[in-house]
Amino acid sequence: MNTKKTFIIGFIFLNLLLISCGSSKQIAYSVTSYDQNKQSTSTVYDDTNKLGYTITKDNSHLYVTVTTRDRGTQVKMLRNGVTILFDNDGKKNNNISVQYPVVKENKPLDIEKIKKMREQGNQQEMLQTIMTSLGTDISISESEGDRIINKELNSEGISVNHKIALEGLYYTLKVPLSYIASPSSTKSIGISIKGMKKPDGSNGTLPMGAKSSGRIKRALAMRGGMKGNNIDINQLKEMLTNINIWIPIKLK
């Protein structure tokens, strides 16, 4: 099997894998507090990017939660990581950013293993397979440069958390207010999620011939109720699209 077909099939299988996480229809709903001392709030939903988010804080930490029920967006979050950016000059610049998971390369999926688990209906094991592959590296970018820290133990006090629930996929970043150079001057917070890459390493439309690939049709046919020759190309194109959201904030 050539590289292009391997990429597309793996791409689709991960998409199919996340179908069981919930409906793609999006609604605004309350988000459970990251800890018992932090006030809950309602999710703001960005319909264009099919992404919900909350930004809250307590006396010592800032919490950014990103959530989605859209399976294509879930794929991008897990495969390409979520980057949270802190803008201190009002120009939407990347003064400080935190990314997790760190994507070093697009590792091929174990198609046969996932297929077997899916046939057995073991959804929890399928999800655990993805979660355990995310690694422990967090990438942080500062004025001094970029570096990697461990999400389990780091001197910065930064932590990240992924959770799959009936409401969708949650990603939460917890960062000390003291880590942000000047919390009172932070003008906005950015959420950046890269789209899936084509086999040639670039973003954009699907490779030529993807629509007519017999292997892709058979992969999609595994989804109940979907005919093998009925491919949602628009959904695949959305998975190639970058997400960039900037939210004005006032931290005191």
Image (cartoon, grey):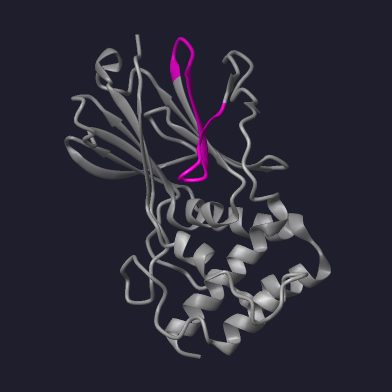
**Residue plotted at (72% across, 75% down):** 222
**Residue plotted at (25% across, 21% down):** 181
* Number of callouts: 0
Report the residue that reaches farthest toward the right. 120
Q: Is residue 28 above or below residue 199?
A: above
| Res. 239 visible in picture | no
Q: Is residue 113 located in the magenta-colored stretch of the structure?
A: no
Q: Is residue 75 above or below residue 220?
A: above
Q: Is residue 88 left or right of residue 177?
A: left
Q: Nearer the viewer, residue 225 or 98?
A: 225
Query: Which percent across, then down, holds residue 185?
Result: 24, 16
Q: Is residue 46 located in the magenta-colored stretch of the structure?
A: yes
Query: Which percent across, then down, holds residue 14?
Result: 59, 65
Q: Is residue 187 left or right of residue 36?
A: left
Q: Is residue 116 left or right of residue 192?
A: right
Query: Which percent across, then down, holds residue 55?
Result: 47, 24
Query: Which percent across, then down, holds residue 112?
Result: 67, 78
| Res. 218 visible in picture | yes
| Residue 127, quarter of picture | bottom right
Q: Is residue 70 above or below residue 93?
A: below
**Residue plotted at (52% across, 45% down):** 50
**Residue plotted at (59% across, 50% down):** 70
Q: Is residue 181 above or below residue 18?
A: above
Magenta part of the chain: 43-61
Q: Nearer the viewer, residue 38 or 135?
A: 38
Q: Could you tell me which quadrant the C terminus lies in?
A: top left
